[in-house]
Amino acid sequence: MEKVKVIELKESILEDNNKDAEVLRQELKEKKICLLNLMSSPGSGKTTTLLALNKAFEGRINWGVMEADIDSDVDAITMQEAGVPSIQLHTGGMCHLDADMTRQGIRSFERDDLDFIVLENIGNLVCPAEFDTGAAINMTILSVPEGDDKPVKYPLMYEVADIMVVNKIDALAVFDFDKDAMEAAVRKLNPDMKFFYISALTGEGVQELADYLVEKVKEWNA
């Protein structure tokens, strides 16, 4: 009896996407557009963080946001009302964006004056970490109420991220959140991780994060 032929679809899909992501990254580099892929669980404060950053970015960079959701346009409307060019991406039930979806979103801006684009990815600590979007920077947010054990439970997210933002530090006194244990767990996965502790609500720490991102955008677009 012949052996059943097994096709590893996930490996094939990821490999094809990785190749396309490299192409997209080069395309954006040539156009002097720095793409940031923002990932986290739902409710961590992605949109609130972007709103806080908008104030700190004022007059320093031209930027836009792609809001990815399974449905709704609430976040895109919120960013537009704050004066940030925004595109809403509906995934039709998919829990992540890949490189080609990201490319379609960038083209939908139909403008060439943006030097920084943020993809606010689907709220999920698993799928978005598996797919390279073609971003120059991967950033993840962990909010204090989620707990300090997320890097242990969802290691891939913290392996692929370049920047880790710990949000809602104004709530540290209320929750049992061990910063040292969290950082130690992340360092084992990613020794080069850059940490920022912020409160998007109060603005604490946001300026430092904004300054760092502006410098990274300038470096990429140089």
Image: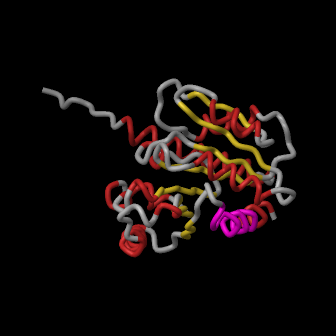
Instruction: Write down the quadrant of residue 57 in the picture.
Output: bottom right
* Image mark count: 0
Q: Residue at x 67, y 38 (%)?
A: 103
Which stretch did the figure color magenta?
203-215
Q: Residue at x 86, y 42 (%)?
A: 112
Q: Quadrant of the C terminus?
A: bottom right
Image coordinates of residue 35 in percent, x first then y, are 68, 51
Residue situated in front as seen by the camera: 50 or 15: 50
Whether 69 is among the magenta residues is no
Examine the rendered structure and indicate whether residue 63 appears above or below residue 5.
Answer: below
For this orientation, the residue located farthest to the front is: 174
Whether 205 is among the magenta residues is yes
Answer left or right for 171 relative to 86.
left
Magenta: main secondary structure equals: helix
Q: Quadrant of the N terminus?
A: top left
Examine the rendered structure and indicate whether residue 199 appears above or below residue 83.
Answer: below
Image coordinates of residue 161 in percent, x first then y, are 52, 59
Answer left or right for 197 relative to 183.
right
Answer left or right for 84 relative to 172.
right
Residue situated in front as seen by the camera: 132 or 172: 172
Q: Residue at x 56, y 70 (%)?
A: 194
Image coordinates of residue 6 in percent, x first then y, are 28, 33
Image coordinates of residue 123 in percent, x first then y, are 49, 41
> Which colour assignment does the render follow?
secondary structure
